[in-house]
Image (cartoon, rainbow, N blue to C red):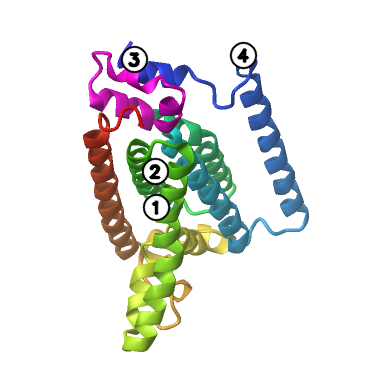
Amino acid sequence: MGPPVVWKELRAPFIQGIDNRNSYIGLSMAIVALVLTYIAGAVTNSLDADFTHVAYVMLFVFIGALINIVFSATRITTEKESQSWSLLLTTPLSDRDILLGKAISAFRRCLPIWGLLAGHLVLFTLAGYIHPVASFHLLVVVAWLTCFLTGAGLYFSARFARTTSAVVATFALAVGLWVVGPTLAGLIGVMGGKNDLFAMYMWTHPAVQTGIIVGATAGSQNAGTSLRSLDYRPMAVSRSAHGSLRVGTVTYVLLGIAAGYILVGLLFFWRAKCRLRRRVFG
């Protein structure tokens, strides 16, 4: 059967309800609404434009990250508030098994959104509107984003006794990195004369990575381009960045940034493991 916590978390429905019906109804309604937007896009002839797919993919990534933050930051604190956390810690389960189950649960909650993203990519790749390499690049983005946010959420969930505190702390980390950070980098770059500082920082932003990837690979013209001819425009990051990048360079940059975020996510996971049995009763 595997680790009991993993089994327990996998048995829980996406949305609380009788026989998982709420989950199926909500997912079905989301798919129907998405299909209706596709039909509207087909009527207006906008599905072959790159900006249309940039908007779709950005939405999927934003919602997926939002759900990841909420559920990873509540995996442990909800059990503390329900007084079941101390009972779980008295079982023969290792700290690693407990955290692994919580991490899988947080990832599972995001699966419907990532599934919609995967479906969008497959559908419009087959339709000739998105280049196949976009799926690999976006997989890299989703992988590091999931690992980083899950590790951070579990750490704050183990660190705090209240769900609100853990969620707020995880959101604050994301806002600090991807809202406040770019603002400060831009100000420092302007004041210090380092025009490339902002551009370098923005490459670590998930929304910017998504925009660059989809902007270069979506649209009927880009989808039909050979792999070597794809043109990734750093102008999307900063006006001071001229020229274009090729697919090999972009792949190396994305993998390097992903490796850094994944290492930090694993560090958060390790710190959560270290704090798992501290302040058990609040």
Tell me which label, 3 or 4, sits earlier in the chain. 3
Q: Position of residue 33 (x, y in %)?
A: 72, 41
Amino acid type, callout 2: Thr
Please name the residue shown 63% across and 20% down the image. 17
- The secondary structure type at the circle numbered 4 is helix
Tell me which label, 2 or 1, sits earlier in the chain. 1
Where does label 2 land, which residue? Answer: 146
- The secondary structure type at the circle numbered 3 is helix
Where does label 4 land, which residue? Answer: 19
Tell me which label, 3 or 1, sits earlier in the chain. 3
Amino acid type, callout 3: Pro
- The answer to whether residue 222 is left or right of residue 151 is right
Tell me which label, 3 or 2, sits earlier in the chain. 3
Q: Position of residue 180 (x, y in %)?
A: 43, 67
Q: Which one is closest to the eye, mark 2 or mark 1?
A: 2
Where does label 3 land, which residue? Answer: 4
Between residue 136 and residue 131, name the one nearer to us.
Answer: 136
Prevailing secondary structure of the magenta residues:
helix
Residues marked 3 and 1 touching at CB (< 8 Å): no
Q: CA distance from mark 2 to mark 1?
A: 14 Å
- The answer to whether residue 240 is left or right of residue 60 is left
Q: Which one is closest to the eye, mark 3 or mark 1?
A: 3
Where does label 1 land, which residue? Answer: 137
